[in-house]
Image (spheres, rainbow, N blue to C red):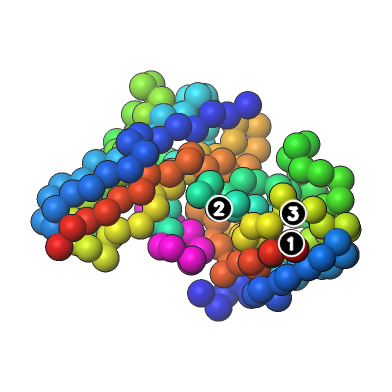
């Protein structure tokens, strides 16, 4: 799937700050960040609908999303923790009237040392 | 808070068998329902979705929704080894249809 691009694909960090990037060229209105830890389903972290943020209140404050425009999504992580090791998926979906299941990017695999 | 549960947790079937996967959800006001398939190390990929009660068939896959029972299912006819994967059901939120919540998944193994 090259319609949603994520970078970087792999990330190995000590206790550092880093940003994940996502871009979609599908004209979708909604963009998501999901976290998938080993042997678990994707867990919704943040959702932007027409650039309005809806957050999962259980996500630690060291994760800060940013939506600079309707096609781009960033996830800033400050002082990563070992429990943050997971695959972070960006996803997007079109307008509500079209009701399509979110399309996922290939993910960024984060390993925290 | 929407609750989405899947059964069984894992399933082993022989090649050619009919496979049935189940998903229950907590709120009948949910707006759409989807099944995803995730191969190991890959991104989840949407298989099928449905918005109103009834059945929908696409090739070997059939999705069935009963909102009153808070239940939907995926049936795979003539299961193939390539169908072996993690199957995730997904349900939209009630107050926000974009808020898609996943079940914990069913690991399907199709033996050749």
Q: Secondary structure at mark 1?
A: strand
* Badges 3 and 2, same chain: yes
Q: Is residue B63 left or right of residue B60?
A: right
Q: Is residue B37 left or right of residue B77?
A: right
Label located before the other in sequence (1 or 2): 2
Q: Does residue B73 lie above or below B47 as drawn?
A: above
The quadrant in which residue B58 appears is: bottom left
Label located before the other in sequence (3 or 2): 2
Is A9 or A70 nearer to us in this picture?
Answer: A9
Q: Which residues are magenta?
A: B39-48
Asked if residue A74 shows in the view, the reply is no
Q: Is residue B40 magenta?
A: yes
Q: Looking at the image, do the residues carrying marks 1 and 2 touch, with CB atoms under 8 Å apart?
A: no
Asked if residue A77 shows in the view, the reply is yes
What is the chain identity of the residue bearing mark 2?
A
Q: Which residue is mark 1?
A: A112
What is the chain identity of the residue bearing mark 3?
A
Give the residue drawn at x 43%, y 44%: B105
Within-10-Å neighbours for mark 1: few <14, some 14–19, many 20+: some
- Residue A96 location, x and y as percent? 59, 49
Give the residue drawn at x 62%, y 46%: A43
Q: Is residue A10 left or right of residue A106?
A: right
CA–CA distance between discs 1 and 2? Answer: 14 Å
Q: Which mark is residue A82?
A: 3
What is the chain identity of the residue bearing mark 1?
A
* Badges 1 and 2, same chain: yes
Q: Which residue is mark 2?
A: A38
């Amino acid at each position: 799937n090259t319609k949603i691009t994520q970078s970087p694909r792999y990330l190995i960090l000590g206790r550092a700050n880093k940003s994940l990037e996502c871009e979609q060229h599908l004209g979708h209105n909604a963009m998501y960040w999901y976290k998938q830890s080993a042997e678990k389903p994707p867990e919704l972290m943040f959702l932007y609908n027409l650039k309005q943020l809806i957050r999962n209140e259980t996500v630690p404050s060291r994760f800060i999303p940013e939506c600079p425009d309707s096609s781009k999504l960033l996830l800033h992580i400050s002082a990563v923790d070992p429990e943050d090791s997971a695959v972070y998926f960006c996803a997007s979906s079109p307008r509500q009237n079209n009701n399509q299941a979110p399309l996922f990017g290939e993910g960024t695999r984060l390993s925290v040392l | 808070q929407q609750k989405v549960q899947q059964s069984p947790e894992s399933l082993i079937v022989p090649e050619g068998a009919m496979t049935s996967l189940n998903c229950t959800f907590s709120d009948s006001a949910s707006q759409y329902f989807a099944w995803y398939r995730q191969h190991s190390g890959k991104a989840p990929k949407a298989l099928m979705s449905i918005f109103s009660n009834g059945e929908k068939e696409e090739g070997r896959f059939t999705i069935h929704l009963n909102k009153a029972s808070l239940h939907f299912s995926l049936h795979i006819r003539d299961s193939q080894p390539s169908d072996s994967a993690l199957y995730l059901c997904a349900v939209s939120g009630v107050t926000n249809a974009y808020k898609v919540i996943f079940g914990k998944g069913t690991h399907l193994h199709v033996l050749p």
